[in-house]
Image (tube, rainbow, N blue to C red):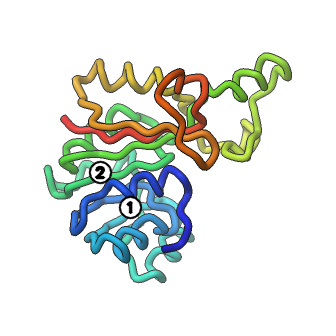
Amino acid sequence: MTALRPDLAVIAANVAEGARVLDVGCGDGALMAALRDSRHVDARGLEIDPGNVAAAVARGLSVVQGDADTDLAGYPDASFDYAILSQTLQTTMRPHVVLDHLLRIGRRAFVSFPNFAHWRVRASLLWGGRMPVTRLLPVPWYDTPNIHHVTIDDFRAFVRERGITVEQAWFLKGDRRTSAAAANFRAEHAVFLLRR
């Protein structure tokens, strides 16, 4: 299996063998291909970028071009075991609506996102007075697709207020996992497995 981005590797390791999966914002289909090849998963994808759709289809994947903000409403209830939204939530116009659809479409949902409360982000703002550009957030503020700067603590409150159950959570520091202790300060990325 090709090396996956760290958050995708966490998701791939925790999807059940033979599951039906919808990967929303699937990019070039790297996760879907890994799940198909290693877990025999029936994976479908939704992706907004036509170049990524073409790359995924070239891998033999079932991917359609679409927008998470507008196109999830057409999927039937409980039609997948897992709905996946990796590093896409913060780019959506209405994250609460997208998350509601994920949990309606899938029996469980994986959501991963960059943590904007990580200590390096805080330090960049404090000492430099500017939005950070890092290895994991590599573009300047005016060119970023991120429109909602979410933190781990924000997301925990967000799901708690909506009565969503967190089955598991993983926190990443670079390419490695870190503990849940002070994750809002220490983790660069988070992955949550959710259910209603």
Residue drawn where x is 26% and y is 23% of the image = 162
In the visual, does 83 lie left or right of 196? right
Q: Give the mark, 1 or 2, whose residue is nearer the N terminus.
A: 1
Q: Where is residue 84 in the image (x, y as percent from the top left)?
A: 35, 52
Residue 158 percent coordinates (x, y): 37, 23
Using residue 131 as the reference point, say whether residue 9 is left or right of it. Answer: left
Local packing at callout 2 (Cα closer than 10 Å; few below 14, some 14-19, many 20+) is many
Position of 152 relative to 97 (above/below): above
Image quadrant containing the C terminus: top left
What residue is at 61 percent from the left and 49 percent from the top? 175
Say which residue appears at 38% left-offset and 61% top-offset: 46
Q: What residue is at 49 percent from the left and 37 percent from the top? A: 171
Q: What element carries label 2?
A: helix
Q: Distance between the residues labelled 1 and 2?
A: 9 Å
Q: Are marks 1 and 2 in contact (CB under 8 Å)?
A: yes
Could you tell me residue 76's position as x and y percent?
A: 15, 54
| Viewer-proximal residue among 172 and 109 | 172
Give the amino acid type for the residue marked by disc 1 in the picture.
Leu
Give the residue pinned by disc 2.
72
Viewed as shown, does residue 126 lie left or right of 162?
right
Residue type at mark 2? Leu
